[in-house]
Amino acid sequence: MDVRRPDGEPGRIAENGASVRAGRRPVGTLIGCGLIVSAAAVMLGLSVRHGMTVNAWELSPAGMKAWAKFDRQEECIYHAIRSEVPEGAAVYIHDAAVYNAQRLAELSTLWAVPQPSPATARWTLSLVPGQACSGLSLEVRPR
């Protein structure tokens, strides 16, 4: 039931008869919500802008050239694996760079069988700096 409190503010009476202040939101809560919504809008705008910038670079001549070089490098590594490791061989991928280890695992899967431990592998594969594949070379060591 709506009533006026002694201080003149609108209020309500709870079921137990106590006076309850009417539902007003403090100004601080409204300002906080506004700041959160504003920050989310800014972050969304920056994310869209970044995505458009990345897409524009990837479709530029420089981006196409970089992707073509990457594709040639992947193909070179794949052919190196096929020429230096017997088909179906158990291999262990040993590379300090996680990205290179992932690349080797993916490229060797079609020809060899990557192993989780060096104890079960006959060969160890890693990528090292070199001239064979656009700045990288495959290093193959028997176990």
Image (spheres, rainbow, N blue to C red):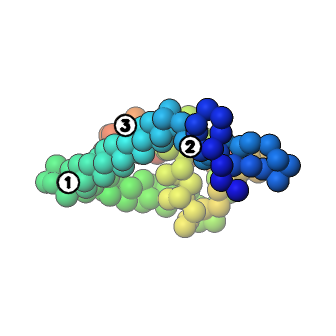
Q: Circle 3: is it few (<14), some (14-19), or many (20+) Cα within 10 Å? A: few
* Structural distance between the alpha carbons of marks 3 and 1: 31 Å
Q: What residue sits right under mark 2 in the picture?
A: 24
Determine the secondary structure under disc 3: strand
Query: Eyeballing the image, is 123 above or below 27?
Result: below
| Mark 3 residue type | Gly
Determine the secondary structure under disc 1: helix
User: Of the residues tagged 3 and 2, which is closer to the observer?
Assistant: 2
Determine the secondary structure under disc 2: loop
Q: What residue sits right under mark 1 in the picture?
A: 56
The numbered dot on residue 130 is 3
Left or right: residue 23 versus residue 143 is left
Count of all numbered marks drawn on residues in the image: 3
Going 50% across and 32% down the picture, which residue do you hit?
28
N-term mark: 3 or 1: 1
Q: Circle 2: is it few (<14), some (14-19), or many (20+) Cα within 10 Å? A: few
Q: Visible in this render: residue 54? A: no
Q: Visible in this render: residue 109? A: yes
Going 63% across and 44% down the picture, which residue do you hit?
4
